[in-house]
Image (spheres, coloured by chain):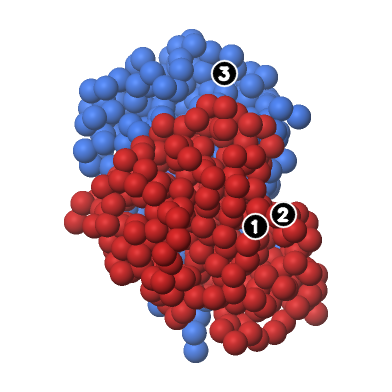
Chain colours: A blue, B red
Amino acid sequence: MALWFDETYAGKIRFGLKLKRSLFSGKSEFQSVDVVETEEFGRALALEDAWMTSERDEAHYHEMIVHPALTTAPRIKRVLVIGGGDGGTVREVLRYQEVESVVMVELDKMVVDVCKEHLPSFGVPWDDKRLSLKFEDGIAYLKNYSGEPYDVILIDGSDPVGPAEGLYASPFYESAKRCLAKDGVLVSQTESPIAMASDFARIVKTLRASFVRAEPYFVPIPLYPSGMWSFTYASDSIEPSAFDPARASKIEASARYYNRDIHRAAFAQPSFVRALLAR
Amino acid sequence: MALWFDETYAGKIRFGLKLKRSLFSGKSEFQSVDVVETEEFGRALALEDAWMTSERDEAHYHEMIVHPALTTAPRIKRVLVIGGGDGGTVREVLRYQEVESVVMVELDKMVVDVCKEHLPSFGVPWDDKRLSLKFEDGIAYLKNYSGEPYDVILIDGSDPVGPAEGLYASPFYESAKRCLAKDGVLVSQTESPIAMASDFARIVKTLRASFVRAEPYFVPIPLYPSGMWSFTYASDSIEPSAFDPARASKIEASARYYNRDIHRAAFAQPSFVRALLAR
């Protein structure tokens, strides 16, 4: 019997991978959590039957949510990650020696526990002393935060439905801005400009209402609906093209997807994206 | 009953679209031919149960196989298209007033007939007097060609298995080079660097053995395995970045995917592609 796992998006498109076996299947307080071993993409995590990450393509996502911000922000001592339960995002952040502390605020502890056990190849340095894990709601965390501002905030949440919906709305961005240094950088995953074109456009415009600049950039993520994904780089004063050559060249040496040419190129907008954002 | 059509690639990954209805299902001398109406991607063509093109994403493919070559080649009077039965490629070529003749050599007449009937929204100017259609084998056509050289050759073939296999091999590229002007440009679709990584690398290297320069570039095509697709720009003397601003700006005005930023950005190679090509 051939086992497949398909993510069906909006009842209209689906992407499936043939499985070798299921490694974990459970339900947390918030969602269903599955880890499977696939024939083609290695081990993969799914939440609520939606693909989240796989050994094969996780570098595209994690390098590209982190390095455009961390190679351009003037300071990267204090970094906040909202979501990102599989740990790939904090792994990439912790590659920078200049980073002194990373706070990761993940709603669902089961996701972290399951990924620690079943995705060891992600090589997340969970024991790094610079990393603090908080299992709580990222929206409430930022709303109530009154500490020193963060230099960089990375929003690595799931789709804007259910518990993650508030991560893509104006009140959350205003909280984030209040907790971000004046010359800080915020990056969020912002969905597919093809499969979720209206969500994508709405989120980018919402970010533009809170920040002087909010520029989407694009990365192929085979696991996600339509395969073309976006992140958005938001800042009041920093330009996404102004990278620190020393930081960028060091990261480039070990990256699987990221390099400086890709960093620059990712910000080019296809004409249909220009049209979506001009409406 | 919900109807779906899934392309399964290499028995390990699949991409499916929910259907409204089937518009045509037949078998030509060479392959099975289907046109379906999907919920999310409009009408779509499949050959041998592999997705070929859809109303929703065809512009990504057709604009990007044509415009990098046609905005950079020093002359574009005589253009040859091998394959491309749905007509999207010749439609984009015929947008240039400077083009005096386009020869399209397609193996399978049924594909053209079915697309003319069932994909009218592609808006292919089949009756344009500059267009000559030849229903024959592109490999034999170029092998036996002894006419005036072509300024641009575009290879819009299906995957390198079965009848299209020879379109990605050294003898064919040598024939093409013999039929191409010395300062001409050849572009071929060259598969996915993720789903068909070894085919991709082999084909680019084979092109590099025949041409002074062969540079892959990348385009998101949601319909194709992994969603990240490549084309390769090959020439003995022309650089893919040297576009004619007048031609490019005119094309850009009506394009859905292509623009000059995208043209430049598409040539950036992710680090895993650099590694594949360095081996």
Q: For marks 2 and 3, give the one nearer the viewer.
A: 2
Q: CA distance from mark 2 to mark 3?
A: 46 Å
Q: How would you rate the neighbour count of disc 2 (Cα within 10 Å): few for under 14, some for 14-19, many for 20 or more?
A: few
Q: How would you rate the neighbour count of disc 1 (Cα within 10 Å): few for under 14, some for 14-19, many for 20 or more?
A: many
Q: Residue at x 34, y 47 (%)?
A: B182
Q: Are marks 1 and 3 on the same chain?
A: no
SS class, disc 3: strand
Q: CA distance from mark 1 to mark 2?
A: 6 Å
- The quarter in which the C terminus of chain B is drawn is bottom left
Q: Residue at x 59, y 14 (%)?
A: A212
| x then y, percent, for residue A116 | 35, 55
CB-based contact (under 8 Å), mark 1 and mark 3: no
Q: CA distance from mark 1 to mark 3?
A: 47 Å
CB-based contact (under 8 Å), mark 1 and mark 2: yes
Q: Which residue is mark 2?
A: B128
| x then y, percent, for residue B46 | 63, 72
Q: Which residue is mark 1?
A: B131
